[in-house]
Image (spheres, grey):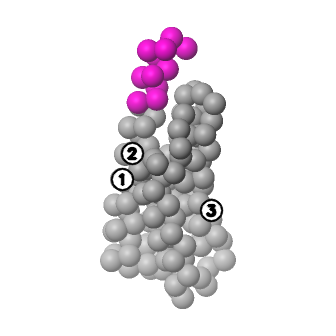
């Protein structure tokens, strides 16, 4: 594998995580006990699993962690939709985060696809 810090998807997911942490500190959001905490956890899980996957010893293990990151990204998207529906965040806050999370999901999909193709060419 390689240096996890060089992965563009890691950098994008860290930006997403940072934005989520800042967002969940707003007054409306922070009054809810569960949703901000779970939203932070899912956003933190994305770059954490990408880093863990990139530093794993095989493509098969890497793919497993990248899939966990992808699932956490979908979880985050759901939590952001709920926050938007509850009016904890407005459209101007929601849409950029939705776009960034979609970008991260797409990048993860492509990374998983690439690593899966490498598995097939190596013969595992």
**Marks 2 and 1 close (CB-CB < 8 Å):** yes
Q: CA distance from mark 2 to mark 1?
A: 6 Å
Magenta stretch holds residue 25: no
Distance between the alpha carbons at the discs numbered 1 and 3: 19 Å
Can the viewer see residue 51 in this picture? yes
Q: Residue at x 57, y 47 (%)?
A: 51
Q: Which residues are magenta?
A: 114-124
Where residue 88 appears, as percent x and y from the top left, is 48, 80
Residue at the disc numbered 3: 41
Return the mark for residue 53.
none
Quadrant in the picture for residue 60: top right
Residue 110 in the figure: left or right of residue 5 = left
Instruction: Say whether disc 2 or disc 3 marks the residue closer to the N-terminus.
Output: 3
Quick check: 91 left or right of 53?
left
Q: Which residue is at 62% across, 44% downward?
A: 52
Q: Measuring from the top left, give residue 62's x and y in whole percent.
A: 57, 35
Q: Quadrant of the N terminus?
A: top right
Q: Is residue 122 magenta?
A: yes
Q: Residue at x 63, y 30 (%)?
A: 57
The kind of secondary structure element at disc 3 is helix
Q: Is residue 26 above or below residue 9?
A: below
Q: Which residue is mark 1?
A: 103
Q: Quadrant of residue 111?
A: top left
What residue occupies the far top of the structure in this picture?
Answer: 123
Mark 1 neighbour class, 10 Å CA radius: few under 14, some 14 to 19, many 20 or more: some
Give the number of callouts. Answer: 3
Q: Which residue is under mark 2? A: 107
Q: Residue 73 appears at what percent x and percent y?
A: 49, 53
Tag 2 secondary structure: helix
């Amino acid at each position: 594998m390689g240096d996890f810090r060089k992965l563009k998807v890691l950098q994008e997911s860290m930006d997403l995580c940072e934005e989520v942490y800042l967002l969940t500190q707003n007054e409306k959001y922070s009054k809810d006990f569960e949703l901000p905490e779970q939203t932070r956890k899912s956003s933190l899980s994305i770059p954490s699993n990408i880093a863990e996957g990139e530093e794993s010893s095989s493509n098969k293990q890497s793919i497993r962690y990248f899939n966990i990151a992808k699932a956490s990204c979908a979880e985050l998207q759901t939590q952001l939709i709920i926050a938007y529906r509850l009016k904890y965040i407005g459209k101007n806050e929601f849409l950029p985060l939705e776009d960034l999370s979609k970008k991260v999901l797409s990048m993860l999909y492509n990374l998983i696809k690439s690593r899966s193709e490498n598995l097939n060419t190596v013969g595992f």
